[in-house]
Amino acid sequence: MEWQQLEYFQRVAQLQHVTKAAQSLFISQPALSRSIARLEKELGVPLFERQGRTVQLNRYGKLFLEKVNLAIQVIEEGKQELQSEMSPNRGNITLSFLPTLGTDFVPELIEKYRATYPDVTFQLFQNTAHDLIEQLKAGDIDVCLTTIVEPDPEIQWVELFSEELLVIVPQCHRLSDRQEIRLKDIANEPFVGFKKGAGLRSITDRLCQQSGFTPQLTFEGQEVGTVAGLVGVGLGVSLVPKRSRMDAYQVSCLPVRDVDCRRTIGIVWRKKSFMPKVVEQFRDFIVELYGRA
């Protein structure tokens, strides 16, 4: 059974006239008749009661027409959705990002983008750095925002910006009045950290190792707000991005002078997978807006 046969059947059923249907389809009347005959032979039942060039659906034809109309409607809707996806000015983008980017960076990014492209919609996810890449490779998302990733032939990572990481301590802490500290100054402090797999966890572990110690973890979280809140009540110290808003928490933010405490954020996409125009335009918008020369 061919898709064209179903379209021909639908048109004959609508017009109830073989010659008129053939003319509207821009084919010959014998060709249309042969197509209908092959369809009836494949189905094993007649679909029309014939009176010369005029035809009427029989009960089998009426039953089959209901299914054909539904199938054609679904296919047409699918074609329209695909065409919408191919348009750079409308469609849906699935974006996943680190939880630490959800407070301000991602909302600001989407606000800026939709100011120019208001018809674009977003489906958003938060995840750890490791799981973001797994999502991407599985095809569950279009692009993601994360820290530096290991070289991988399947994906492309482009740097967007680099930001300083600050040590946060309770406001009543012995170090709270310092202008800056050495990272090893917190070597013996209880540490409120991030869960394994989180980008900040791997960065924190690496920086602390460079300073000669392993953090003494008292809690492992995912959200900067949770970590800062627990630091504020004296559960320990931590290392967070400078752009994180700490005003709501009872913490002091301290720059580190002896170690280059920074993290780099980039955008990642699959190299060889098809990318809809709406996603391609969004990716290029981000790179142009934030990308480093």
Image: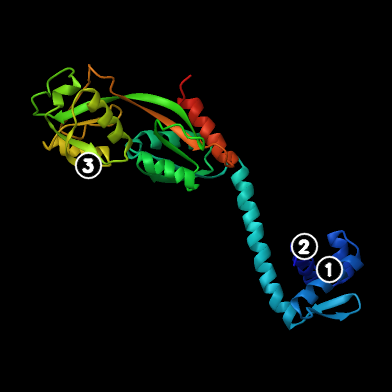
Position above or below: 222 against 43? above
Location of mark 1 (residue): 35
Q: Tell me: 178 left or right of 118.
A: left
Residue at the image point whose x is 8% and y is 29% from the top: 172
Whether residues under marks 2 and 1 lie with C-beta atoms below 8 angstroms apart, the answer is yes
Image quadrant containing the N terminus? bottom right
Query: Which residue occupies the foreground of this view, 259 or 22?
Result: 259
Position above or below: 119 against 255? below
Q: Secondary structure at mark 1?
A: helix
Q: Secondary structure at mark 3?
A: strand
The quarter of the displayed image where residue 89 is located:
top right
Query: Which residue occupies the foreground of this view, 173 or 153?
Result: 153
- The amino acid type found where label 1 is placed reads Ser
Query: Which residue occupies the foreground of this view, 136 or 168?
Result: 136
Reading the chain from its start, which is encountered first: label 2 or label 3? 2
Location of mark 2 (residue): 4
Q: Tell me: 182 left or right of 285.
A: left
Reading the chain from its start, which is encountered first: label 1 or label 3? 1
- The amino acid type found where label 3 is placed reads Glu
The quarter of the displayed image where residue 246 is located:
top left
Q: Position of residue 139 (x, y in %)?
A: 50, 47
Residue at the image point whose x is 80% and y is 76% from the top: 41
Q: Position of residue 3 (x, y in %)?
A: 74, 63
Residue at the image point whose x is 61% and y is 47% from the top: 84
Residue at the image point whose x is 62% and y is 43% from the top: 86
- The amino acid type found where label 2 is placed reads Gln
Location of mark 3 (residue): 220
Residue 203 visible in the shown view: yes
Q: Tell me: 149 left or right of 272.
A: left
Mark 2 vs mark 3: in front: 3
